[in-house]
Image: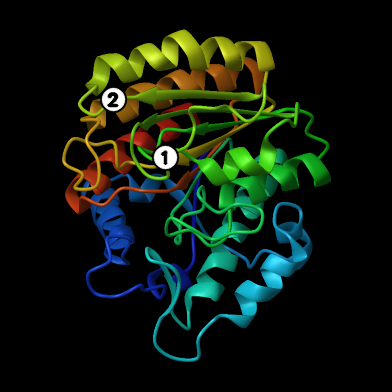
Amino acid sequence: MPTAYITHPSSLLHDMGPYHPECPDRLRAIDDRLISSGLDSYLQHHEAPPATHEQLARVHGEGYLATLGAESPISGLHYLDPDTAMCPDSMNAAVHAAGALVLATDLLVRGECKTAFCAVRPPGHHAEHNRAMGFCLLNNVAVGAAHALAVHGIERVAIIDFDVHHGNGTEEIFAGDPRVLMVSTFQHPLYPYSGLEQLGPNMVNIPLAAGSGSDAFRAAVRDHWLPALEKHRPELLYVSAGFDAHREDPLAGLKLTEADYAWVTRELVAVARTHAKGRIISTLEGGYALGALGRSVAEHIRELLVAA
């Protein structure tokens, strides 16, 4: 059974300026690596649909969605915060990025595939219920998880976030919801300077110091994530797959390698096989060293393909 690879042309049109690290070349670097490694031919390619207003409103406020749409510029850039800007194509890209998670959820629940990777931008895990921030407009992974719970009768999901920045938006949206377990690692102190005070008993946040590297990351997964996941018994796993903890990344310093991303994916595959019929949906978050990003995503997808 193939791994679904879901993207949309609008993801390449979202552009926050020539010097912004969250750039269209990120997706080109991933595509190039998948082709050169031979993995691309094993993927089942899908074009993401736009998320509907109903799907977005499960995790975002009506007023926020209206404001976001109204602030979409006709030309140039409109800054929502010092790091987050919209160009004329950004809103379309964001709606399709969220829609990719909806499609992935539908494909997995229908049994058409067991694993999926959403190669979309803008990323999502910093977007809160009523706030865009940290390069993120809509919380893609939250839209997908909420869709599974509301439409498909899934009772328990897990969201795994190994981006180097804490997924504050995902935590804020699902804090206190017993149906959703979120486990994460992130560098601290580092933007958005959150995660030390867990907002609910369903949150397992493990801060790591700069330079921690593979041993500390793997210990956090073994000692904290895996016991929590085993207790929760998720029926579907979502991964906020940020690759900016890589040692080559310019925005942080956790010093992970491609081998770490392959290892953690294998660990999550084992959880999914035990509790979730093997079902894992992964979506791109951070990762700004283009070569490292391409290699890391390829190793992550390689493990998803083996699982499928």
Name the residue carrying label 2. 209
- Looking at the image, which is closer to me, 111 or 289? 289
Residue at 26% across / 14% down in the picture? 215
- Looking at the image, which is closer to me, 282 or 254? 254
Residue at 53% across / 42% down in the picture? 168
Residue 99, x across and y down, in percent = 62, 60
Residue 192, x across and y down, in percent = 42, 45
Judge the density around disc 2: few (<14), some (14-19), many (≥20) Cα neighbours within 10 Å.
some
Residue 148, x across and y down, in percent = 73, 42
Residue at 43% across / 17% down in the picture? 221
Image quadrant of residue 112? top right
Q: Amino acid at mark 1?
A: Tyr
- Per the image, label 2 sits on a secondary structure element best described as loop
Query: Which comes before the other along the chain, label 1 or label 2?
Result: 1
Residue 305, x across and y down, in percent = 43, 35
Which labelled disc corresponds to residue 69?
A: none
Image quadrant of residue 172? top right
C-alpha distance separating marks 1 and 2: 13 Å
Q: Nearer the viewer, mark 1 or mark 2?
A: 1
Name the residue carrying label 1. 193
Q: Is residue 238 above or below residue 90?
A: above
Quadrant of the image containing the N terminus = top right
Instruction: Answer left or right for 267 relative to 47.
Output: left
Judge the density around disc 1: few (<14), some (14-19), many (≥20) Cα neighbours within 10 Å.
few
Q: Is residue 3 above or below residue 73?
A: above
Instruction: Answer left or right for 148 relative to 260.
Output: right
- Per the image, label 1 sits on a secondary structure element best described as loop
Q: Amino acid at mark 2?
A: Ala
Examine the rendering and report whether any part of residue 251 can be seen.
Answer: yes
Examine the rendering and report whether any part of residue 277 can be seen.
Answer: no
